[in-house]
Image: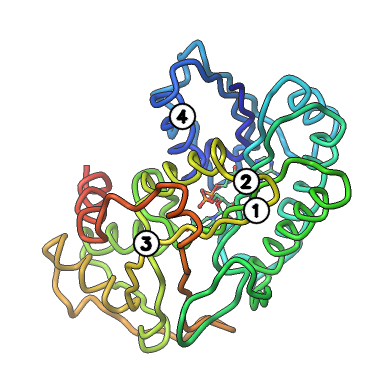
Amino acid sequence: MRILVTGGAGFIGSNFVQYVLEEHEDDEVVTLDALTYAASKDNLAGVLNNPRHDFVEGDIRDRDLVTDLVSDVDAVVNFAAESHVDRSIDGAGPFVSTNVQGTQVLLDAANEADIDRFLQISTDEVYGQILDGKFAEDDPLNPRNPYSATKAGADLLARSFQTTHDLPVLITRTCNNFGPQQHPEKLIPKFIQNAADGEALPVYGDGSNVREWIYVEDNCRALDVVLRNGTIGEIYNIGSDAEKTNLKVTETILDAVGADDDLIEFVDDRAGHDQRYALNTEKIEALGWEPEYTFEEGLERTVEYYLE
Ligand code: NAD
């Protein structure tokens, strides 16, 4: 399979590119990335010289470039996005532009080409918060911050191209990822860094917000399973069942780094902060996938990576 991976110099995308090239020795990957502040070509250091990999610096909103690249692949996996909730609260413009319009450009190009699969990477945040129980794939979308609203928009556009144009779309909605190559603005890398430097760890509100955490390698394996074995037109939740309050995550990081609990600093809560996300994962489990890493095992590897 020849795959166009957009956003492949970011956190999950770069882990996915490496995973595919390692696991599938006949596959070829073209990485398209605009190299925004969130990206690093270093994330792809291990594959830049791989003859089965091409890196293209460019924007998913560049219609001519995207049309050209999509015409030459069997599958598209769209990771490219503005991804940080706090930045979307400061200004939603770039989020609408890349996450919604960029996805539309990719969908248009895929629709004109002859591709076998279009995997749209979405998030558990599109469902909004849930205080009890878990979200299933057919639950209504109720995004509550600008980031998740634009991801929901992209998700719905992708679904509409499947129903109206018969485009072979698949959608995944994954919980919070953590692991190597994540931008240090995100909670886990930032807190590891601060703990190691003896700086305060700013916890929103009272730290009681709950997130489900998945080690990025487990997510990449799940995305690969959906790309190859998922049923066209279906949505797959990807979760780990590892639910943790932000405070618990913070304490676990302090413990792993060997830093003191008094570095915890409670700060004003994020506006519209969702209390809890949780995913029902029966559908992807039916494809034979389950996570391999516990939260603690994943965190141990992650702490080791950032401290190095
Ligand atoms: P990231 O911010 O690390 O990476 C995003 C990548 O997209 C960057 O390399 C950036 O340069 C690129 N990009 C941004 N705008 C672009 C544009 N206009 N054209 C081309 N490239 C562009 O994000 P991530 O955490 O790796 O997330 C990847 C995808 O997974 C996103 O779609 C995100 O919504 C989704 N997701 C992330 C998580 C998570 O916990 N990180 C969970 C569920 C879903």
Q: Is residue 42 above or below residue 103?
A: above
Question: Mark 4: is the Cβ under 8 angstroms from ligand 1?
Answer: no
Q: What residue is pinned by disc 4? A: 20
- The residue carrying mark 2 is 231
Quadrant of the snapshot with the C terminus: top left
Do the CB atoms of the residues marked 2 and 4 lie less than 8 Å apart?
no
Q: Secondary structure at mark 4?
A: helix
Residue type of the residue flagged with mark 1 = Glu
Q: Estimate the spatial distance between the alpha carbons at disc 3 and disc 1, rounded to whole Å.
A: 20 Å
Disc 3 marks which residue? 240
- SS for tag 3? loop
Work out how far the residue at label 2 is from the one at label 4, CA to CA, in angstroms: 20 Å
Q: Is residue 40 depicted above or below 303 in this figure?
A: above
Instruction: Return the residue found at the far left.
Output: 258
Q: Residue at x 75, y 27 (%)?
A: 70
Task: Choose mark 3 or mark 2, whichever is in front.
Answer: 2
Residue neighbourhood size for the residue with mark 2, other residues' Cα within 10 Å, grouped as few (<14), some (14–19), many (≥20):
some
Mark 1 highlights which residue? 234
Q: CA distance from mark 3 to mark 2?
A: 21 Å
State the residue in front, 300 or 111: 111
Q: Quadrant of the N terminus?
A: top right
Tell which circle, 2 or 4, labels the residue nearer the N-terminal end.
4
Confirm if mark 1 falls within 8 A of ligand 1.
no
Local SS, label 1: loop
* Number of disc labels: 4
Q: Nearer the viewer, residue 166 or 262?
A: 166
- Compute the Cα span from label 3 to label 4: 21 Å
Q: Mark 3 or mark 2: which comes first in sequence?
A: 2
**Whole-percent x and y of residue 297?**
20, 54
Asked whether mark 3 and ligand 1 are closer than 8 Å, the reply comes as no
Residue drawn at x 36%, y 85% as measured from the top left = 208
